[in-house]
Amino acid sequence: MNAAYWIVAGLLALFYLYGGGVKLVRSREQLRPMMAWVDSTPMRAVRAIGTVEVLGAIGLILPPLTGVAPGLALVAAAGFVILQIGAATVHLRLGDRRIALNITLLLTAGVAAWLATTRLR
């Protein structure tokens, strides 16, 4: 289970480090081709989401790696589940039915949360 956690958490962390980092440094115009929802969202909220994503990615990796507060990995994975529920809701509310990536990330975060609980036992 340890190797499975590191594979799942590593891939999830890479995705969120990239996605969150992009939200932190790019302008609305640069984000628009990838994320149509930025037009209906204040940039402060977009930046906040990016910050949450980067911190969550760090939370998936750093606590289990250092052994300091390893339970934070479970919190980070559960946070990503909640984040993707919200993201899918926003997409659907805006009429965007392409939520396959959101569902995939939700399921992957759920697996990471489950694997994190098995690591804590």
Image (cartoon, grey):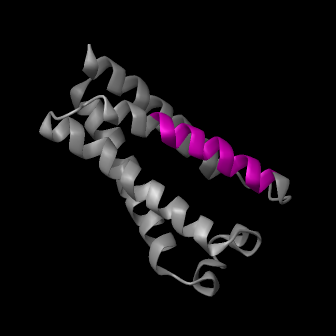
- In this picture, is 34 found above or below 52? below
Please identify the dominant SS of the magenta region.
Answer: helix
Residue 60 x, y percent position in the rendering = 32, 42
Nearest the eye: 82 or 91? 82
Residue drawn 33% across the image and 35% down it = 73
Q: Residue at x 37, y 53 (%)?
A: 55
Magenta region, residue range: 78-92
Could you tell me which quadrant the N terminus lies in?
top left
Q: Is residue 31 above or below residue 6?
A: below
**Is residue 75 placed above or below 45 in the rendered structure?**
above
**Left or right of 111: which side holds 42?**
right
Task: Work out which quarter of the rendered image holds the C terminus and state it.
Answer: top left
- Which percent across, then down, holds residue 17? 38, 60
Q: Position of residue 40 (x, y in %)?
A: 77, 70
Q: Does 68 appear above or below 58?
A: above
Is-magenta flag for residue 89? yes
For the view shown, which residue lies furthest in the top direction?
A: 121
Q: How many marks?
A: 0
Residue at horizontal 50 percent and vertical 43 percent from the top? 80
Front-most of residues 38 and 106 = 38
What residue is rendered at 83% in x and 60% in y?
94
Furthest-left residue in this view: 66
Residue 20 point in image, percent of width and height: 46, 63
- Asked where in the image residue 54 lies, by quadrant, the reply is bottom left
Q: Please identify the residue farthest to the front as the structure is shown.
A: 44
* Residue 36 horizontal side relative to residue 44, left or right: right
